[in-house]
Image: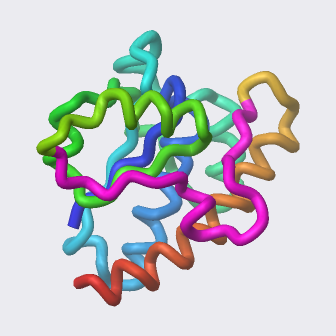
Amino acid sequence: MRVLFVCLGNICRSPTAEGVLRHKLQLAGLASQVDVASAGTGNWHVGQPPDKRTQRAAKLRGYDLSAQRAQHVSAADFSRYELIFAMDNSNLRDLQALQPVSGKAELDLFLRRYEGVKHEVPDPYYDGEQGFEEVLDLIERACDLLVIELKGRL
């Protein structure tokens, strides 16, 4: 099983989701059965590590994102991954426009699928530290539910 998280620049929300899910899969004994990655709909951060504030907030909760590097989503990703999750509606629209007819990936808003109230992961880039904490809160809860779903699929 392969899962891809997508946000705008791949330096805040999607690398957070990648790191959290990797950690939770490790704890569940599923790390060897699920490949996890993240990408951005924009290409201006390709090759860069996650934002320092993202890394700091994640590190305080036990997630190490330092080895991750931003990458740009491609049409080939729709054949490479079974699940592709957009962090917000704008990302979802960009992915829908890029999705080839032959793509096999399930495409959805990450929180719509796993969070009953809020459908978008807010972009914390221009917010203070609290924005990064809110992103982690939302992503941790949603990843717990995603791990349950993945257990049922494997």
Picture quadrant where residue 139 is located: bottom right
Residue at image position (87%, 31%) is 128
Q: Nearer the viewer, residue 53 or 125?
A: 125
> Percent position (x, y) of residue 18?
44, 52
Outermost residue on the front side: it is 101
x, y percent for residue 63: 55, 56
Q: Residue furthest top?
A: 44
In screen coordinates, is 71 left or right of 76?
right
Q: Residue at x 70, y 34 (%)?
A: 123
**Magenta residues, start to end:** 103-124
Residue 34 placement, left or right of 27: left
Location of residue 104 (image quadrant): bottom left
Please give the name of the residue rendered at 79% of the width and 52% of the height, measured from the top-left corner. 134
Q: Position of residue 86 (x, y in %)?
A: 49, 45
Residue 123 on the magenta span: yes
Q: Closest to the observer: 151 or 99?
A: 99
Write the residue at 35% across / 78% down: 150
Q: Quadrant of the N terminus?
A: bottom left
Q: Vertical placement of 142 versus 90: above or below?
A: below
Q: Quadrant of residue 38?
A: top left
Residue 56 position, x and y percent, is 68, 41
**Residue 129 higher or lower than 44, as above or below:** below
Q: Nearer the viewer, residue 135 or 80?
A: 80
- Reply above or below: 82 against 79: below
Q: Is residue 148 magenta?
A: no
